[in-house]
Amino acid sequence: MRYRPLIWAALAATLIDQISKYLVVHVMRVAAGDIDVLPPLLVFKYGENRGINFGLFQGNTEAARWVLIGISVAISVGVLIWLMRSTPSKLMMISGGLLIGGAIGNVVDRLLYGYVLDFLNMSCCGINNPFVFNLADVFIFGGAIGLVLFEGKKPS
């Protein structure tokens, strides 16, 4: 099946994201206090994101929550349709799957909690980064970069 790499990448990204959030937030209880993993490079810090990346467009209303869910689903469907109408390489299919899986992971959070759970914080070289993110964000970013880098490559 031509779409198998996309499906597996999306499924893996969603599961890895949700399992990591469960472990760090509910098992390790990061909300009780920061967890130094490789300080200052990597610290687990609890965050609730009711907006989009970097806390932009924060909204505490139900309407904002559903608008953001709708946007995530629309982008995911758009990427899926685009990939289905083209002859993408295997790397593009994997990239699209990562993007879609990351988006689904964040949608699951919004459905369950009303916000996205964030816990990753990275700082370096004397710069204290105040922002937190999650693995879904990493998959979305990596998938988007992959779609750009591998677009136009011959299908494999």
Image (tube, grey):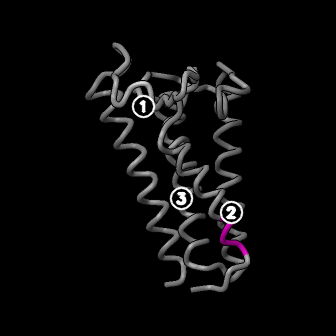
Q: Residue at x 61, y 79 (%)?
A: 89
Q: In this picture, is 22 found above or below 86?
A: above
- Report the Cα–Cα distance between label 2 and label 3: 11 Å
Sort mark 2 into few (<14), some (14-19) or many (20+) by Cα contacts within 10 Å: some
Q: Which of marks 1 and 2 is nearer the N terminus?
A: 1
Q: Which residue is found at the position 62% from the left and 63% from the top?
A: 146
The residue tagged 2 is 79
Q: Callout 3, which amino acid?
A: Leu
**Magenta highlight on residue 87:** no
Q: Name the residue under label 3.
A: 98
Amino acid type, label 2: Val
The reply, left or right, for residue 30 in relation to residue 154 is left
Q: Main secondary structure of the magenta part?
A: helix
**Local crowd size for mark 1, using a 10 Å CA cut-off: few (<14), some (14–19), many (≥20):** some
Residue 51 falls left or right of residue 105: right
| Magenta-tinted stretch | 147-151
Task: Point out which mark residue 42 bears.
Answer: 1
Residue that appears at 36% across and 31% down: 38
| Front in this rendered view, residue 144 or 114 | 144
- Name the element at disc 1: strand
Q: Which residue lies furthest to the top in this view?
A: 32
